[in-house]
């Protein structure tokens, strides 16, 4: 049974319909049903998982059980500054963007733009990644009506309206984005109420003449659900890479956010829908499509309007992603991977500042002397793990996303003016500026995979 006071739920819906009418800058709360969205100001999350949401139209806060809430999006937020070049990963999967101040046998002292200086015990460390830079933006748009065009200047093209590409019925548009070997593609599809969308988004497309066979990928969404497919220039023409059984009727707000992470060097694709992973896949054909274009095809019935907005392509660092996913050679030993793919197994003794920059001191299993590695030469450190490490990361209710790409699992939080005080299962009590918070969502327990 849902645990909340129904009087305040009514107030919450009234307030949601009057967003912008009052003085509060409201946070947005999406309920698990997906059909309802409340607005207000999040005041706390108790140890029992119950959220308190303050509305201008209620003297007392609306109380929502954690099982009811899908996510909270914070309205007050500063622009993200240049993120730090180091990511520290904890044994429970949390990620803290930071700079390394120093490290010894007991733990590491980091400087986070969100948390300030923070000491993390060594037993809580899973990995460090160095040399992370802001993703290079390849394309963001649409910005005007001339960016995406029909090659034959046909009338059945997408129109530019209010920052989006809009199609009524059948339409086609393409653009050569010069997609890199490894990239992240994002976009948002929206369609009319009581209408059936029908869309194909082609990528890694050589943009050949209509009807000509070629090597490319495409995402297809319509009445049958969503498919990720591969077209081949030879052999079997069409191959389904993945099928996601989510129909348009399962999106009450008639919107779908898509993210595709593509690494052509190892033939891998990762699909995310509405910020949730739908699966990781391999190209089943073998020869990877080399094209750099995108094509947008609306196959909707006459009069049906659908739109695409927020199209973004950025280059990703596939090397760092691959290193992060690697299994350790020995679970009871530290591993260091350099940017040249050199690998060392042994013990990371410490990290210290020198006149030439920070240096990692590593004791290799194959020698008695310490090996000094400049931070600039290191890609990834994987720390030794034990069964007790996983046990230390107790189950929590929520995932907190903060400025700069940080992700932390939390048990509870409360607000004192513009400061959020968070109870973290490994690091204890942490303080964040409210402006640094981005999203709180339901946490998915970290899987215990073999070899970790």
Image (cartoon, grey):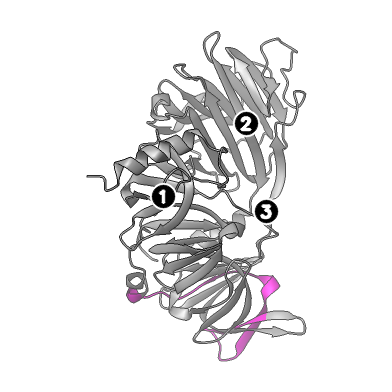
Which of marks 3 and 2 precedes in the sequence? Answer: 3
Q: How many marks?
A: 3
- Mark 2 = which residue? 309
Q: Which mark is residue 107?
A: none
Q: Over which residues does the magenta segment extend?
A: 359-388
Q: Tell me the quarter of the image containing the C terminus.
A: bottom left
How far, Cα to Cα, is label 2 from label 3?
21 Å
Q: In the rendered view, does 12 fall on the left or right side of 357?
A: left
Asked if residue 362 lies in the magenta stretch, the reply is: yes
| Camera-side residue of 243 and 161 | 161
Which of marks 1 and 3 precedes in the sequence? Answer: 1
Label 3 vs label 1, nearer the camera = 1
List the single residue furthest toward the bottom: 368
The quadrant in which residue 207 appears is: top right
- Mark 1 = which residue? 59
How far, Cα to Cα, is label 1 from label 2?
39 Å
- Mark 3 = which residue? 79
Where in the figure is residue 148, as x and y percent of width and height?
A: 72, 25
Q: In the rendered view, does 395 fall on the left or right side of 84?
A: left
Seen in the picture, residue 393 relative to 278 is either above or below; the reply is below
List the single residue furthest toward the left: 1
**Visible in this render: residue 211?**
no
Q: Residues within 10 Å of mark 2 (few under 14, many from 20)?
A: many
How far, Cα to Cα, is label 3 from label 1?
32 Å
**Visible in this render: residue 439?**
yes
Where in the figure is residue 137, as x and y percent of width and height?
A: 71, 46
């Amino acid at each position: 049974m849902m645990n909340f006071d129904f009087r305040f739920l009514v107030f919450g819906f009234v307030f949601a319909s009057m967003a912008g009418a009052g003085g509060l800058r409201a946070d947005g709360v999406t309920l698990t049903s997906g059909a309802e969205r409340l607005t207000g100001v999040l005041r706390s999350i108790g140890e029992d998982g119950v959220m308190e949401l303050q509305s201008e139209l209620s003297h007392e806060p609306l109380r929502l059980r954690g099982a009811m809430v899908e996510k909270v999006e914070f309205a007050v937020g500063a622009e993200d500054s240049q993120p730090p070049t180091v990511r520290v990963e904890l044994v429970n999967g949390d990620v803290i963007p930071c700079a390394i101040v120093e490290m010894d046998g007991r733990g590491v002292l980091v400087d986070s733009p969100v948390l300030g200086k923070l000491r993390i015990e060594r037993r809580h460390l899973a990995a460090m990644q160095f040399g992370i830079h802001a993703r290079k933006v390849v394309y963001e748009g649409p910005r005007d009506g001339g960016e995406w065009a029909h090659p034959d200047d046909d009338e059945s093209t997408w129109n530019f309206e209010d920052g989006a590409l809009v199609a009524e019925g059948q339409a086609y548009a393409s653009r050569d984005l010069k997609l890199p070997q490894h990239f992240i593609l994002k976009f948002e599809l929206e369609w009319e109420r009581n209408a059936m969308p029908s869309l194909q988004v082609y990528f890694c497309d050589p943009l050949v003449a209509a009807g000509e066979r070629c090597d490319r990928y495409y995402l297809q969404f319509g009445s049958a659900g969503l498919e990720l497919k591969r077209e081949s220039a030879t052999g079997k023409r069409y191959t389904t890479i993945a099928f996601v059984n989510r129909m348009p009727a399962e999106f009450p707000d008639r919107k779908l956010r898509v993210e595709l992470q593509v690494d052509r060097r190892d033939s891998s694709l990762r699909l995310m829908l509405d910020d949730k992973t739908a699966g990781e896949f391999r190209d089943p054909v073998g020869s990877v499509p080399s094209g750099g274009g995108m094509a947008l095809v609306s196959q909707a019935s006459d009069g049906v309007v659908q739109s695409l907005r927020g199209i973004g392509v950025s280059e990703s660092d596939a090397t760092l992603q691959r290193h992060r996913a690697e299994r350790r050679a020995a679970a009871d030993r530290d591993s260091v991977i350099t940017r040249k793919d050199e690998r060392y197994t042994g013990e990371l003794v410490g990290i210290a500042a020198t006149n030439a920059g920070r240096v990692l001191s590593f004791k290799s299993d194959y020698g008695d002397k310490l090996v000094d590695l400049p931070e600039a030469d290191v890609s990834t450190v994987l720390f030794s793990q034990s069964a007790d490490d996983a046990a230390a990361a107790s189950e929590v209710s929520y995932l907190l996303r903060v400025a700069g790409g940080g992700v932390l699992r939390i048990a509870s939080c409360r607000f004192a003016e513009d400061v959020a005080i968070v109870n973290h299962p490994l690091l204890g009590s942490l303080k964040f500026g409210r402006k640094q918070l981005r999203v709180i969502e339901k946490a998915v327990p970290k899987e215990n995979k073999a070899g970790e």
